[in-house]
Amino acid sequence: MMKSRLILDKIKALPVSRDGFKKVFGGCEEYIRRYRDEACLSQEYMASRLGISQSTYQKIEAGRVNVTEERLGEIAHILGKEIEDFVLSKQKELNENDIEALKEIIALQAKEIKELRFLLNKKT
């Protein structure tokens, strides 16, 4: 959860529009269901962990309820996935600001990886 939360906080800090978030993560319900099935978790379990009803959770998987960034972070944590795992593989049109913001996220992740490797090497 900590890593997903850090990435989510970085996304929020960047000038990515809500539409840009939807373009990247819109349709993530396909992945939510697939990853839940792979983990052999029930909708009831997911709903209870999220503090919502099973019917509301079912609507998330059906794509009838928009998933917020925060909710996607919670779902990713429960499923043991990273937020990036919920990006649709089909090409999405992004505006230039969204692309630049996503590039900055990638650069921040690379920096974080470098810092974590340094800390790991320091411990050994």
Image (spheres, rainbow, N blue to C red):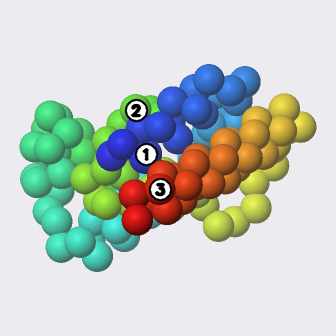
Point out residue 78 in the picture as x, y percentages from the top left corner.
25, 53
Q: Secondary structure at mark 3?
A: helix
CA–CA distance in space, label 1 to label 3: 24 Å
Query: How many marks overall?
Result: 3
Q: Which residue is mark 3?
A: 122
Label 2 with label 3: CB-CB less than 8 Å: no
Point out residue 120 in the picture as x, y percentages from the top left corner.
45, 59
What is the crowding at mark 3: few (fewer than 14 residues within 10 Å), some, or many (at least 20)?
few
Q: 41 and 12: which one is in front?
A: 12
* Amino acid type, mark 1: Ser
Q: Residue furthest right?
A: 96
Please tell me which residue is depicted at 16% across the width and 65% down the height of the picture: 41
CA–CA distance in space, label 2 to label 1: 10 Å
Please tell me which residue is depicted at 61% across the width and 39% down the height of the picture: 22
Q: Which residue is mark 1?
A: 4
What is the crowding at mark 1: few (fewer than 14 residues within 10 Å), some, or many (at least 20)?
some
Label 2 with label 1: CB-CB less than 8 Å: no
* Amino acid type, mark 2: Glu
- Residue 82 is left or right of residue 24, and the answer is left
Label 1 with label 3: CB-CB less than 8 Å: no
What is the crowding at mark 2: few (fewer than 14 residues within 10 Å), some, or many (at least 20)?
few
